Image (cartoon, rainbow, N blue to C red):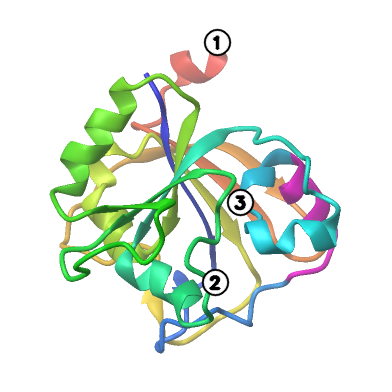
Amino acid sequence: MRELTYLVASTLDGRITGPANDNPDFFLLEGDHAQPTRDEFPEIIPTHFRPMLGMVDVPNAQFDTVLQGRGSYDIGLREGITNAYRHLRSIVFSRTMAESPDPTVELVRTDPVAKVRELKREPGAGIWICGGGKLAAALLPEIDRIVVKLHPVVAGDGIPLFGGDFSPTRFRLARTQPFDSGVLHLTYRRGAFSPEKEAK
């Protein structure tokens, strides 16, 4: 069965963008974390940036589908970008959009959990939640892996990593990757820590 991964950059205080829900300019774009991130997750680089990075022909490594909420999708739409991830199957969840602005973007106006369960049963590679926090909270029961690109920044306010109702859910730390830039990649898997499981 396909995995659902929430892969996202976050500040130390758990913000994924600013209060205006615009493209965040406070994350570290350069540093020794940048190339390893592109190597491991090339598909998260937006299609329009890939030529500048010499990544036009780089194949997807982990995902073939990207999920966005309305707020996350609107960040690109305001800049005239109707599909930032043309190299992936792009799905936007919104109950307020009447129709998709781009024929390559699938608009889902129904329950996101039901849709993700349907996607997981289909053949294919991993599924990536690009954002935002409300969608991640709605899909929390289906998230198999969380990869937080933790940046050494405190925002003070903004859109939270998860924006939903109080619902404590345990994940176990599976991997840490510290970088000299101060960025720390944290990978969590669903479920509590088990010494027997970790020993295998």
- Residue drawn at (54%, 79%) of the image: 23
The crowd level at tag 2 (other Cα within 10 Å; few <14, some 14-19, many 20+) is many
Which residue occupies 32% across, 27% down? 120
- On the picture, is 46 further left or further right than 35? left
Q: Which residue is rendered at x = 24% and y = 64% of the image?
A: 99
Q: Quadrant of the N terminus?
A: top left
Q: Quadrant of residue 47?
A: bottom right
Inspect the magenta stretch and tell me whether residue 125 lies in it. Answer: no
| Sequence-first tag of 2 and 1 | 2
> Mark 2 belongs to which amino acid?
Thr
Gap between marks 3 and 2, in whole Å?
A: 18 Å
| Residue 44, disc | 3
Which marked residue is nearer to the observer: mark 1 or mark 3? 3
User: In the image, residue 154 lies at what x, y percent?
Assistant: 55, 81
What residue sits right under mark 1 in the picture?
Answer: 200
Q: Are marks 2 and 1 in contact (CB under 8 Å)?
A: no
Q: Which residues are magenta?
A: 29-39
Please name the amino acid that badge 3 sits on.
Answer: Ile
Q: Which of disc 3 and disc 1 is earlier in sequence? A: 3
Is residue 180 visible in the rendered structure shown here?
Answer: no
What number is the disc on residue 11? 2
N-terminal-most mark, 3 or 2:
2
Q: Amino acid at mark 1?
A: Lys
Tag 2, which secondary structure? loop
